[in-house]
Amino acid sequence: MSERPSTPPSYSSDTTISAPDYEFVRTLLRKEIGFDLGLDRQYLVVNRLIPIAAMFECRDISHLIDRVRQSQDRRLIEALAEGMTINETSFFRGSQKLFDNLAQIAIPALLRARSSNRRLRIWSGACATGQEPYSILITLLEQCPQLRDWNLEIVATDISERALEQARSGVFNQFEVQRGLPIQMLPKYFTKTGDRWQIADTLRRRVTFQRHNLLDSFLRLAPPLDIVFLRNVLIYFELSTKTELFQRLRQCMAPDGILVLGETESTLGITTDFRLNDACRDFYQPAI
Ligand SMILES: C[S@@+](CC[C@H](N)C(=O)[O-])C[C@H]1O[C@@H](n2cnc3c(N)ncnc32)[C@H](O)[C@@H]1O
């Protein structure tokens, strides 16, 4: 960050991006995080890169892109890739029914199958700011008392260190706790600190947050995994990336494990490595 702009930064809202710069960012995102931008999201790139250009003291976004092009500096590349991620999420995203089905259909079957070692491993891949793994944990605490003396591991990962920082802190603003969290859960699991809400330490300590790129090996997650939430991230990937990811995922999941995708996501036309669960159409499981 030593380079100082010789002219004042120009970050006006009418900033545009040249076709070669757009193509450069598009290729870089595909390679770094699997994000397929498409042809016409110039507005998104401009909006997201303006703060990053400012952070690295670049004159404008074309200066930032030039620096990435010439230096191939990993710090810049990672900041650019992370800056383009969309961390939209909410508590109990999708529907409360999905989480009820997790507790009432998926978990009882797994508890029966794991009764000898009493261990259950859950992974929330692409967890953003943490609402997803915390929703899973609240569901289990509320609805699965049988799990109390089990070895329950919840690992939550994302590529965005910024999102993970908030997830680890367990601090949410008023808007975030009002989105999806049943009202009676707020005083039960959160404490008001100033104008924010802090999740209880007992919950915070039960989720392990780690930075992980879904394009990288899943072995770090110490398979086999019993339940995998991989929601609202595959939509950004191109077909070949999704197919390859499902293939790797299948190898890391227990044969009777449960995979949960986002509402608009499915395996249809992408892979035969997973099939719909017989007992509940919200869930997939590895194909035999
Ligand atoms: C729209 S959020 C979804 C959050 C949550 N799963 C949900 O459904 O509410 C997508 C998340 O995927 C993460 N992401 C995007 N590409 C990724 C990659 N290659 N590896 C890991 N996480 C990635 C983003 O940082 C973002 O937090």
Image (cartoon, grey):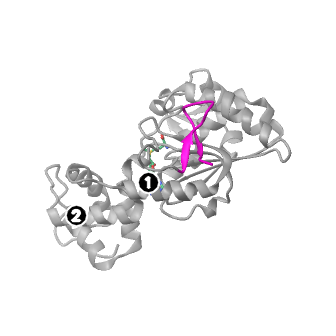
In the image: residue 254, left or right of residue 71 = right
Residue occupying image coordinates x 45% and y 41%: 266
Mark carried by residue 49:
none
Does residue 60 show up? no
- Residue 285 included in the magenta stretch of the image: yes
Image x and y of residue 250, in percent: 59, 54
Quadrant in the picture for residue 3:
bottom left
Q: Which residue is nearer to you in this view: 80 or 220?
A: 220
Image x and y of residue 241, in percent: 42, 58
Q: Which residue is mark 2?
A: 23
Going by the numbered disc 2, the residue's amino acid type is Glu
In the image: residue 49, left or right of residue 137 = left
Going by the numbered disc 1, the residue's amino acid type is Lys
Q: Are the residues tagged 2 and 1 within 8 Å (C-beta)?
A: no
Element under disc 1: helix
Q: Which residue is nearer to you in this view: 51 or 120?
A: 120
Q: Farthest residue toward the right?
A: 116
In the image: residue 11, left or right of residue 56 = left
Q: Residues within 10 Å of mark 2 (few under 14, many from 20)?
A: some
Element under disc 2: helix
Q: Which residue is mark 1?
A: 242
Does ligand 1 reach within 8 Å of label 1's beta carbon? no
Image x and y of residue 14, in percent: 13, 50
Overall secondary structure of the magenta section:
loop
- Residue 280 included in the magenta stretch of the image: yes
Image x and y of residue 161, in percent: 49, 57
Position of the N terminus, as image quadrant, is bottom left
Please state the extent of the stretch shown in magenta in the rendering.
273-288
